[in-house]
DNA sequence: GCAGAATACTTTGACGTCCAACTAAAGTCC
DNA sequence: GGACTTTAGTTGGACGTCAAAGTATTCTGC
């Protein structure tokens, strides 16, 4: 017995079709689904990160620094690798510095550039948070390997389609 | 000849594996991909909507109202159907009212409730914006029907897995 | 060597999202 | 009916994101 779905996205899809926009219905549903799943996953990640005082954005900065040879990167590179606006990178770094997790140092080779150094405290924190995220979120997504692969491929296709270096 | 990929997500995935977190690598890549695709799609949608003065959040409110019989819904229902915090619904409605696209009216049957009415201007605007989004974005996603179906299924799986009424 | 262009950041401002706290109006229960 | 508990919205604050404008430094080209 199929009960009436209360899924807002499925309802929207039906409304789209009923309005005569069948050609766009799946696309609308896909875009809306991505928006919603992003919201859910981000909420999940931030919930796990909450005790550490980190947000996902700041975690990503620390994680990126921890992967580099010396734990140092200019702000511009950070924004580039994380694919966010330079202003967002500046914002995250300033907050991280306020918590003593990174240090900002003028680049001796280029007066315009600011080098962000991961501090020992930052490295410790990002390592424990990574373990936590891995076990609590990334390894527990409610998808089997096949679905995961299909989703990854489709998402990569979208990124590529929009010229996203994927 | 395979050129070195510059895809930040693929780079992160490799770093994850190299660090010994292979079990979490795909999950990390999937979560990160969703975050990124959401960002790209939202940017695309807002770019198309820009001339209208609407944002996607406000468009969704208008669209929802336009689908109802009388173009009226209490604020609470709006937040519920759009799956956002009541405060976000309040925010969107206030801005829409400022632009004359909706009107807020006290609910005669319940003094706590506020009914949001779609105005003629609001209906006209949302209809033209819907057409625009359909043709410029929803019908043009760089995915074939198979990929789209797989992605939709995977995303629905994630939502369901997180108890998201899907 | 110097003017003009490009680069690296920062700042300010507009948005949307959520949470926590608060107000007001219903609904519940002796 | 009056006290207590929900429910509906609103407000204020913290964040992250982007765009646009501004500052400083470096690079280019004549």
Image (cartoon, coloured by chain):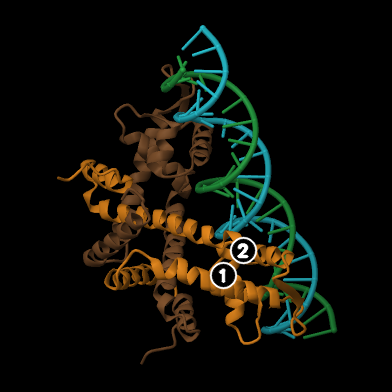
Chain colours: A brown, B orange, C cyan, D green
| Above or below, B132 relative to A106 | below
Residue B58: quadrant of the picture: bottom right
Residue B29 pos. (x, y %)? 31, 53
Q: Nearer the viewer, residue B85 or A89?
A: A89
Q: Nearer the viewer, residue B61 or B109?
A: B61
Residue that label 1 marks: B129
Residue at 34% across, 63% down: B142
In the structure shown, which secondary structural element does the residue marked by tag 2 occupy? Answer: helix
| Above or below, B39 relative to B68 | above
Marks 2,1: beta carbons within 8 A: yes
Residue at 32% across, 52% down: B28
Within-10-Å neighbours for mark 2: few <14, some 14–19, many 20+ = some
Residue B53 pos. (x, y %)? 63, 61
Within-10-Å neighbours for mark 1: few <14, some 14–19, many 20+ = many
Would residue B45 be found to the left or right of residue B106 on screen?
A: left
Residue that label 2 marks: B52
Would residue B79 be found to the left or right of residue A64 on screen?
A: right
Residue A157: quadrant of the picture: bottom left
* Mark 2 or 1, nearer chain start: 2
Would residue B91 be found to the left or right of residue B158 on screen?
A: right
Residue at 38% across, 58% down: B34
Q: Nearer the viewer, residue D19 or B76?
A: D19
> Marks 2 and 1: same chain?
yes
Q: CA distance from mark 2 to mark 1?
A: 7 Å
In the structure shown, which secondary structural element does the residue marked by tag 1 occupy? Answer: helix
Question: Can residue B52 be seen here?
Answer: yes
Q: The residue marked by circle 1 belongs to what chain?
A: B
Residue projecting furthest to the left:
B1
* Residue B110: mark in rendering: none
């Amino acid at each position: 017995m199929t009960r009436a779905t209360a899924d807002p996205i499925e309802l929207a899809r039906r409304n789209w079709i009923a309005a005569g926009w069948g050609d766009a219905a799946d696309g609308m549903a896909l875009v809306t689904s991505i928006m919603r799943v992003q919201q859910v996953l981000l909420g999940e990640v931030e919930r796990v990160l909450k005790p550490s005082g980190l947000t996902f954005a700041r975690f990503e900065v620390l994680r990126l620094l921890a992967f580099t040879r010396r734990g140092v990167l200019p702000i511009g590179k950070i924004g580039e690798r994380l694919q966010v606006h330079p202003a967002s990178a500046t914002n995250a770094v300033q907050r991280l510095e306020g918590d003593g997790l990174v240090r900002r140092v003028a680049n001796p080779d280029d007066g315009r550039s600011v080098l962000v150094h991961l501090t020992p405290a930052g490295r410790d924190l990002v390592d424990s948070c990574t373990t936590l995220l891995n076990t609590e979120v990334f390894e527990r997504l409610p998808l089997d390997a096949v679905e995961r692969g299909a989703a990854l491929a489709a998402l990569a296709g979208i990124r590529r389609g929009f010229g996203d270096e994927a």
